[in-house]
Image (cartoon, rainbow, N blue to C red):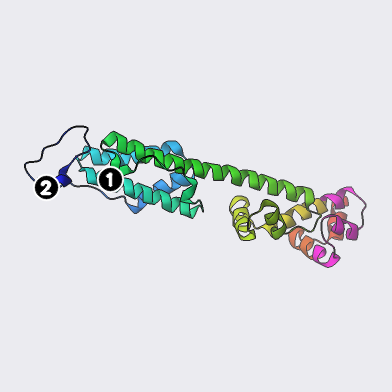
């Protein structure tokens, strides 16, 4: 009969064993919805999602252990989401009490919200770090495109792995590091061809190509013309 206990702030006496009330499971669609809110660090929508799920249980007069099960499932969803973002759970501050010490509906909901809120803070902190990291990378590339740039060089400056930086770059910019660097170099080469009288070899050198052949190949691939043709066609 102890399983019939509700999350109420009062004594409960059980004399008859009632049928267990119907409860619900979190569907894959609802789980994906939670993940989307969590990934976006959307505090309002994530907490609203939690409150809605608890209210559905509460309105069905579910037992206390059903509420604890929901709490555990939300914790598991949160931990999986943190793992997918490569955020260790150790990054969260420990809560003073475990959820099982929450004796009332309100205290359990508040405990769950507090746990998820801490996780969301960690997600937002990583998003801020990611945004500042990408801003640094893009600015550095635009200032040093003529240098011998590489993914390994930038990763070492940021003290992160080149594989992580590669994934971050593709995710945020939409193209890989080499493609973006080539785009910067070709844009600058076009500018120099149209606004200076520099020799093509000198232009290639100024935009980061130490050999003329790969520069010519990339320029033709990008614009459909050789550098000489490009300069001549725009001069007419």
- Earlier sequence position, callout 2 versus callout 1: 2
Q: Is residue 227 left or right of residue 135?
A: right
Residue 27 visible in the picture: yes
Point out the residue furthest to the left here: 15
Inter-mark Cα distance, 2 to 1: 19 Å
Q: Residues within 10 Å of mark 1 (few under 14, many from 20)?
A: some
Quadrant of res 106: top left
Residue 128 as seen in the image, left or right of residue 228:
left
Which mark is drawn over residue 19? 2
Magenta range is 191-216
Q: Is residue 169 above or below residue 101?
A: below
Q: Which residue is mark 1?
A: 68
What residue is drawn where x is 68% and y is 57%? Answer: 177
Q: Residues within 10 Å of mark 2 (few under 14, many from 20)?
A: few
Q: Position of residue 129 (x, y in %)?
A: 60, 44
Please give the label number shown on residue 164: none
Q: Badges 2 and 1: C-beta atoms under 8 Å apart?
A: no
């Amino acid at each position: 009969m102890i399983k019939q206990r509700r999350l109420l702030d009062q004594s409960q006496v059980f004399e008859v064993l009632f049928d267990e009330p119907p409860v619900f499971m979190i569907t894959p669609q609802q789980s994906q919805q939670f993940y989307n809110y969590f990934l976006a660090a959307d505090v309002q929508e994530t907490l609203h999602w939690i409150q809605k799920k608890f209210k559905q249980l509460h309105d069905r007069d579910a037992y206390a252990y059903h509420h604890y099960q929901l709490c555990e499932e939300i914790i598991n969803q949160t931990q999986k989401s943190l793992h997918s973002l490569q955020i260790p759970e150790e990054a969260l501050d420990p809560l003073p009490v475990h959820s099982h010490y929450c004796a009332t509906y309100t205290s359990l909901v508040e405990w769950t919200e507090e746990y998820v809120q801490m996780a969301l803070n960690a997600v937002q902190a990583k998003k801020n770090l990611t945004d500042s990291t990408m801003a640094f990378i893009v600015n550095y590339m635009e200032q040093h495109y003529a240098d011998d740039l590489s993914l390994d060089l930038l990763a070492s400056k940021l003290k992160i792995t080149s594989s992580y930086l590669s994934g971050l770059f593709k995710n945020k910019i939409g193209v890989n590091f080499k493609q973006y660097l080539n785009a910067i170099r070709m844009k600058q080469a076009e500018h120099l061809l149209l606004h200076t009288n520099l020799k093509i070899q000198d232009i290639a050198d100024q935009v980061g190509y130490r050999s003329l052949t790969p520069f010519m190949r990339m320029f033709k691939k990008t614009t459909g013309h050789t550098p000489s043709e490009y300069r001549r066609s725009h001069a007419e």
